[in-house]
Amino acid sequence: MNSLTPAIQTQSLSKIYDNGRGCRDITLTVGQGEAFGFLGPNGAGKSTFVKTLVGLVSASSGSGLLLGEPIGSLKARAQIGYLPELYRYPEWLTGEEVLKFHAGLLGIKGKEMNMQIRTLLDEVSIGKRGLDRVKQYSKGMQQRLGLACALLGNPQILFLDEPSSAMDPVGRREVRELLLELKKRGKTLFLNSHLMQDVETVCDRMALMLNGNMIRTGTVEELLQVQVRWRFKVGGFSTQSLEWLRAESGLNITLEDPNYNPAQDWESPVWLQAEIADENQAGLLNMLIMEQGMTLYESSMQSEKLEDWFVDTVSGQDQRGERG
Amino acid sequence: MNMIISATWKEMIRRKMLLIAAVLTVLFLAVYWFIGDTVSGEVHGDLLMQVARRNAILSLGFFFAGFVVAFLAIFGSFSVISGEAEQGILQSVLTRPLPRWKWYIGRWIGYVTLIGAYALLLFAALLWITNIHAGLTRDYGDILVSLLLFLGAVPILVSASMLGSTLFSGIGNGVFMTMLYGASWLGGMVEKVRSILPVEENVQATLSRIGTLLSLLTPADGLQRRMLFVLTQGSDERIPFLTGGNPPSDTFVIYSAIFVVFAFGVGLWLFKRKDF
C-alpha cells in the first residue's frame, strides 16, 4: 500500500437482499485522507453499502478494496474503525472495559492500550464516566463510546454511520470538530449522515443514494451546480430603472416578487435578484443602482443550501419514479 | 479467543444469571437434605428397600438438577447471535480483525465451561447429600461415567441454542429451545409411562417409538436418564430397576455426540455466512 492507493475502491459492488432492497452496482473511489459524505433518504441503501465495505454483509456481486485489501478480509478490517448506525455495547461492562475488550480484539495491550483508552475517553468527552457501567449511559453517551471504539487502534479509514444522531446540539458540534480534526490528521472519513451541515462542513466529496442506486457524486459545488445569486433590496424603484440596469450590466436581473405592481407598490422597497459570476459584478451592480438614484438598503449573496438541494433532488426523483 | 471466553464468563456473572441459579440451588439443596433425611431415616436392615429409597432420592435430585442445568444452558445462550445483532452489540465486534469462527468457538467454550462447572458442583452436592442419608455406590467408574453423561447435556443444549440463534430472533429462539427441550423431556416421560402401563405389546412398541423420536430432538434429557440409570444400577446393568422405562442405549449416547458435532458445525457454518 502506498499513498496513491485509494482508501476505498469498489467496482460494480451490489448487495441485494431477498426483498429486493439493498444497493446496486456501485463503483466508487475514495482517496486516502479524503472525507466522503454519503447522503440519501431512509432505506436508500447507504447502510447496506457501508456494511458491505466493513465485511458485515457479503456482496451479491462486484468487488471492493480497502487500502488495497479485499473488503471483509482480516487485513482490510485491521485498518478500519466503524461506528454502526445501531450502536449498543454490553451494558454489564463499564465504558473502559468495552474499550479494553475492543483493544484486545485489535491486539493492543498493556501501557499502549491504557494510554489510547484514556486519550480517547477524553477526546469524546466521556472522561471519568468511563468507569461507569454502560447501562448508566444515555444514548448520546453510548454514541460517544461508539466513536471512541471506532477510533481505537488509530485506524486509517473511519466508517461513521450517523455519528451524532443521538446527540444534543453541543455534542453534534463537538463531533463535527472531532471529524475536522481527524481529517487534519489525514484520516479517510466515510460519513453516512442525514445532517447536511456535518456533510457540508466536513466532506470534500459526496454521493447521493436513492433506491439502492448512487445517482450523483461530486464535490458540494459540483452537486449544487453553484450559480451565485445576489439579492438587492432597493427603494425608489421603477420598471425603466430595471431595463436600464439590465442594459448597462448585461446581467439577468429579475424582480423577486412576480406580482409587483408599480402603480400600487411604488413607495415600498423591492427585492431584485441577479445571477452573477463573482463579487466584482455585485459591486458594479451596487454602483449602478445608486447611479440610477435608487436607495440601496441591502446587498447580499444567496447560495443554495445542501439541504434544499437534497430535498429537491430526492423529491424530484420520487416524482419521476411515481410517474414511471 | 481467550478474550471471548472470559467476556462470556463475565457476561454470565455480571448479568447475575449464575448468582440467581446459585441462590436457588442452595435453597433446593437444603430442601433436598430434608427430603433425604426424611426418606432414609426409617430404613435400616432391608437392603433392597434401602437401595430403592436411595434411587428415589437420586431421581428427585436429578429431576431438579437436569432442569436447572438445561434452562441455564438455554437461557444463557439463546440470544447470543440474533439477540446481540438485534441490539447492535455484535456489529462493532465483527468488524474487528477477528475471524468469525474464533468468536463462535470462544462463545461456545465460554458457555460450556461455566455452565459445566456449575453442573459439576451441583452433581457433587447431590451425591454428597445422598451419600450422607442413603449411602452411595463406591464404584467410582460408574460415578465418573454418570458425571460425564450429566455434563453431556450442556454442550448439546448450548450447540443447539447457538445454532437456533443463527436462524431465529432472540425471543423466537428462546421459545424454540424451550419447546424442543420440553418435547425431548416428554419423550422420556412417554418411555416411563409405557413401562408402567399394562398395555398390549403393539401399543408399547408404538409408545416406545414416539418416546425415542421425541428424545432424539435434543438428546440432553435422554443422556440425563442414562446418567441416572448408571448411577443407580451401574454401567454394566441392562435391566432398568425402579427408574422407569428403558435407559437410552449406547447408540443413543453416540448419537448425542454426533448431535453436538452436527449442531455446532452447522451453527458455525451459518454464522460465518450470516449477514448482519
Image: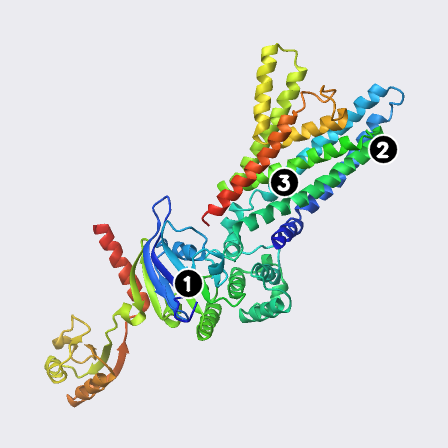
Tell me which corner region of the image, top left, top right, bottom left or bottom right, holds residue A222.
bottom left
Amino acid type at image mark 3: Ala
Tell me which corner region of the image, top left, top right, bottom left or bottom right, holds residue A271.
bottom left
Q: Distance between the residues labelled 1 and 3?
A: 43 Å
**Looking at the image, residue A237 lies above or below residue B179:** below
For numbered disc 2, what is the local secondary structure? helix
Residue B91 falls left or right of residue B56: left
Q: Could you say which is closer to the camera, residue B170 or residue A70?
A: A70
- Residue reaching furthest right? B45
Amino acid type at image mark 2: Ile
Q: Residue drawn at (36%, 53%), measured in percent from left and top?
A: A43
Q: Name the residue under label 1.
A: A68
Q: Where is residue A75 in the image (x, y as percent from the top left)?
A: 48, 60
Q: Mark 3 points at which residue?
A: B73
Q: Residue drawn at (61%, 36%), measured in percent from left and top?
A: B156
Are the residues under badges 1 and 2 in a single subunit?
no
Q: Where is residue A179 in the image (x, y as percent from the top left)?
A: 45, 70
For numbered disc 1, what is the local secondary structure? loop
Are the residues under badges 1 and 3 in a single subunit?
no
Q: Mark 1 lies on which chain?
A: A
Q: Where is residue A216 in the image (x, y as percent from the top left)?
A: 28, 62
Badge 3, how many Cα within 10 Å: few under 14, some, many 20+? Answer: many
Q: Mark 2 lies on which chain?
A: B
Amino acid type at image mark 1: Gly
Q: Position of residue B43 (x, y in %)?
A: 87, 23
Q: Earlier in the sequence, mark 3 or mark 2?
A: 3
Q: Name the residue under label 2.
A: B132
